[in-house]
Image (tube, rainbow, N blue to C red):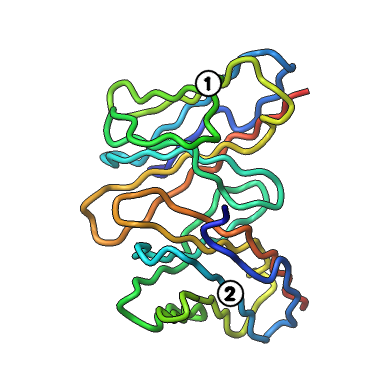
Amino acid sequence: DTGVSQDPRHKITKRGQNVTFRCDPISEHNRLYWYRQTLGQGPEFLTYFQNEAQLEKSRLLSDRFSAERPKGSFSTLEIQRTEQGDSAMYLCASRLTGSSGNTIYFGEGSWLTVV
Amino acid sequence: QQQVKQSPQSLIVQKGGISIINCAYENTAFDYFPWYQQFPGKGPALLIAIRPDVSEKKEGRFTISFNKSAKQFSLHIMDSQPGDSATYFCAASKPGNQFYFGTGTSLTVIP
């Protein structure tokens, strides 16, 4: 499977715990995005990377959220001191800049439930 | 604020009918308008996309109509099938920038 891979697919955690999600983009894709999606809503932008550089962060990304892409390949999204409002699906997407079209390709998402 | 407004929120169509979903945007810097299809528990998958230099793009049963002056675009699904039942999202992006998504349309195609 050469698509965007996310892990874990599902995570249930207690309020106040830290969680980390991993995303492996499509090979050679230099841009990587994180989105959050709640039921009945469209994906909301969180942040994106160009190689290892984090170029933009949404106001949705509070100081409890941190994302990294240390070697310009896989990325991690960590949520510290989780709150019930963090319950959502966290989507990772990637694309290759300079290629024809602007298409971004999504992974299957990581579902987070905070109890 | 919502950068891309999508309607309707839900749509029920008979098998063989035409499904039409509409989106509107304000930012004239947007230059790429994709539609994504999402099944329950899955990530969104690209369906079809258009740039503002064309007014229509067709791929199989799926057509995007684009009205640059009105800043609107729509997805038409011809000969709708039960397998098309999913949530559809329109989106828009500026060059090299993030994607802004609509709130989604839940389509149900009745056999």
- The residue that appears at 57% across and 21% down in the rendered structure is A79
**Is A4 rendered above or below residue A40?**
above
User: Horizontal and vertical percent for residue B89?
Assistant: 57, 61
The chain identifier of the residue carrying mark 2 reads B
Q: Amino acid at mark 1?
A: Asp
- In front here: B90 or B82? B90
**Is B62 rendered above or below residue A25?**
below
Q: Quadrant of the C terminus of chain B?
A: bottom right
Measure the C-alpha gap from mark 1 to mark 2: 36 Å
Q: Which residue is mark 2?
A: B22
Side (left or right) of B94 relative to B99? left
Tell me the SS state at disc 2: strand
**Is B54 rendered above or below residue A66?**
below
User: Horizontal and vertical percent for residue B20?
Assistant: 61, 79
Tell me the SS state at disc 1: loop
Side (left or right) of A43 relative to A16? left
**Is B109 rendered above or below residue A114?**
below
Q: Residues within 10 Å of mark 2 (few under 14, many from 20)?
A: some
Q: Which residue is mark 1?
A: A63
- In front here: B6 or A105? B6
- In front here: A26 or A60? A60
